[in-house]
Image: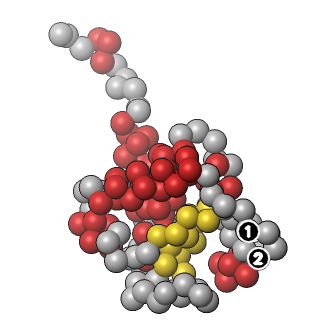
Amino acid sequence: MTQIKVSREFMSAVQQAIKAAMACDDEAVRFMVAYVPIYAQYAATPAMAQAGGCINCTYHGLWIDDWPSFPAAPHGLIFLFEAGIRSQGGDLVENTYGVLLHEMGHALQRDHVLDAMRQMKAAAMYTPRGGCRACPG
Ligand SMILES: [Zn+2]
């Protein structure tokens, strides 16, 4: 299988996502981002897809205890996949951060909590304040 390298743009998005996670208001995320190795890869290999539990899925990221030929790490490894994240469309940095938070949730055994919270906050931020046009001042 040919290994397709990630683009410089994606590497930059990953670096910005890591920086954002280091400034995250969740202390556990700030702590863990320094201890979980984060790898940028173009796409999951078939073996990774199998380990993730869905051989035909397009993976955006993967958290895994350990992986052959990668140095072992006490809290597992995170892979971020350019092809999957790009398939979301929209802002590459924002989407990469979303996937990083998602995988951080797995590393913290808080599966699918962190990114769900982030999406709720984002939705609240963009909810129009109904009735405010009638507010005085
Ligand atoms: Zn997940």
- Mark 1 lies on a secondary structure that is loop
Q: Quadrant of the C terminus?
A: top left
**Observer-nearest residue: 137 or 74?**
74
Residue where numbered disc 1 is placed: 3
Sequence-first tag of 1 and 2: 1
- 1 or 2: mark nearer the eye: 1
Q: Is residue 18 above or below residue 128?
A: below
**Residue 98 in sight here:** no
Q: Residue at x 49, y 87 (%)?
A: 71
**Observer-nearest residue: 30 or 41?**
41
Q: Residue at x 46, y 83 (%)?
A: 76
- Mark 2 lies on a secondary structure that is helix
66 vs 31, left or right, is right
**Observer-nearest residue: 53 or 79?**
79
Residue 1, percent from left and from top: 81, 73
Q: Residue at x 49, y 50 (%)?
A: 13
6 vs 94, left or right, is right
3D distance between C-alphas at marks 1 and 2: 12 Å
Q: Which mark is residue 46?
A: 2
Q: Residue at x 73, y 82 (%)?
A: 47
Q: Residues within 10 Å of mark 2 (few under 14, many from 20)?
A: some
User: What amino acid is at disc 1?
Assistant: Gln
**Observer-nearest residue: 20 or 8?**
8
111 vs 44, left or right, is left
Residue 95, percent from left and from top: 52, 49
Looking at the rendering, which quadrant does residue 43 occupy?
A: bottom right
The chosen color scheme is secondary structure
**Residue 59 in sight here:** yes
Q: Is residue 50 above or below residue 4?
A: below
User: What amino acid is at disc 2?
Assistant: Pro
44 vs 130, left or right, is right
